[in-house]
């Protein structure tokens, strides 16, 4: 557990929780990223605008963190291009089919005690652990 | 206008949270999935701390007559635990376990300008919009 960073994890988690709180309180919506990113072709211009603003904020927040000298100055992606493409496709398809990802089902859905979210989170977390075990463990990477 | 600002501010807070907790780094996420190796429980704390906040705040908020800047709450109403939900969660779990990106961090990592994030994101957006091939437009305003 030498990479465990409990303090920054808690602070980051609280920030994400506050973001979801603020969004529900002010705009009455679930801060679910796959849902927000998955309806950018709406015919209603207001819909597209707030969605794009939320996503710009998402990228901007990380940019601010970096400029402010956050501890993580580089990210590391070791997957090959075919793996990146297939995983990206599955992530997009899967979160649309299941109506949510870690944020919508995890942070928001579980707080609403939604049975659908309990099922979804248990499955995607479990499958992710198994997938990692089968593809990475001991083999050094895929 | 207020609604737009609220969306931007919520996004910013979310992005800051992903940065501070290092969830934008797939290696950090994969460290959590590696339960049988050098396990890094950070992701569990991020989820736990986030949930701790929302569990406290969501109940009083949803009891309000309406949100501050909108006429009504837009909350999911479906309760069906069907093959779509389960199949979707399985697909997403595989994708997540392969690379270590879920949608939020994948989009937020654009701030790092890595080509690999761009490739993942491109594929993810194709996946997000693939249902347009067979689904007819639902909202016409």
Image (cartoon, coloured by chain):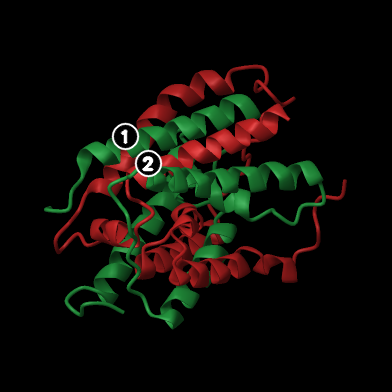
Judge from the rendering whether residue A131 lies leftward or rightward of residue B86; answer left or right. left
Provide the letter of the chain coloured green. Answer: A
Task: Identify which residue is drawn at 43% across, 37% down.
Answer: A16
Provide the letter of the chain coloured red. Answer: B
Which quarter of the figure has residue A131?
bottom left
State which chain disc 1 sits on.
Answer: A
Q: Are marks 1 and 2 in contact (CB under 8 Å)?
A: no
Which quarter of the figure has residue B109?
bottom left
Can you identify the residue that label 2 sits on? Answer: A68
Please say whether residue B35 is visible from this viewpoint.
Answer: yes
Can you identify the residue that label 1 sits on? Answer: A11
The tag earlier along the polypeptide, 1 or 2, is 1
State which chain disc 2 sits on.
Answer: A
Residue B131 percent across, percent down from the top left: 68, 66
Asked if residue B53 is positioned above or below residue B63 in the image, the reply reads below
Disc 1: CA contacts within 10 A as few (<14), some (14-19) or many (>=20): many
């Amino acid at each position: 557990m030498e990479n465990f960073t409990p303090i920054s994890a808690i602070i980051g988690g609280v920030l994400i929780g506050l973001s979801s709180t603020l969004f529900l309180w002010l705009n009455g919506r679930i801060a679910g990223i796959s849902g927000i990113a998955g309806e950018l072709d709406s015919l209603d211009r207001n819909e597209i605008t707030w969605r794009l603003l939320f996503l710009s904020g998402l990228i901007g927040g990380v940019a601010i963190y970096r400029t402010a000298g956050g501890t993580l100055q580089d990210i590391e992606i070791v997957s090959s291009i075919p793996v990146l493409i297939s995983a990206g496709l599955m992530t997009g398809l899967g979160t649309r089919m299941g109506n949510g990802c870690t944020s919508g089902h995890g942070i928001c859905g579980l707080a609403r005690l939604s049975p659908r979210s309990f099922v979804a989170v248990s499955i995607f977390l479990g499958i992710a652990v198994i997938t990692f075990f089968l593809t990475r463990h001991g083999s050094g990477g895929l | 206008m207020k609604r737009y600002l609220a969306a931007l501010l919520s996004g910013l807070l979310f992005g800051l949270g992903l940065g501070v907790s290092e969830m934008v780094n797939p290696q950090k996420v994969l460290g959590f999935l590696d339960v049988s190796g050098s396990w890094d429980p950070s992701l569990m704390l991020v989820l736990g701390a986030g949930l701790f906040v929302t569990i406290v705040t969501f109940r009083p908020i949803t009891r309000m007559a309406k949100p501050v800047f909108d006429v009504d709450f837009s909350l999911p109403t479906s309760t069906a635990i069907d093959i779509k939900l389960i199949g979707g969660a399985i697909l997403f779990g595989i994708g997540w376990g392969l690379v270590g990106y879920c949608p939020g961090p994948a989009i937020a990592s654009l701030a790092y300008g890595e080509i690999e994030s761009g490739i993942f994101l491109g594929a993810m957006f194709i996946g997000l919009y693939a249902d347009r091939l067979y689904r007819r437009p639902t909202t016409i305003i």
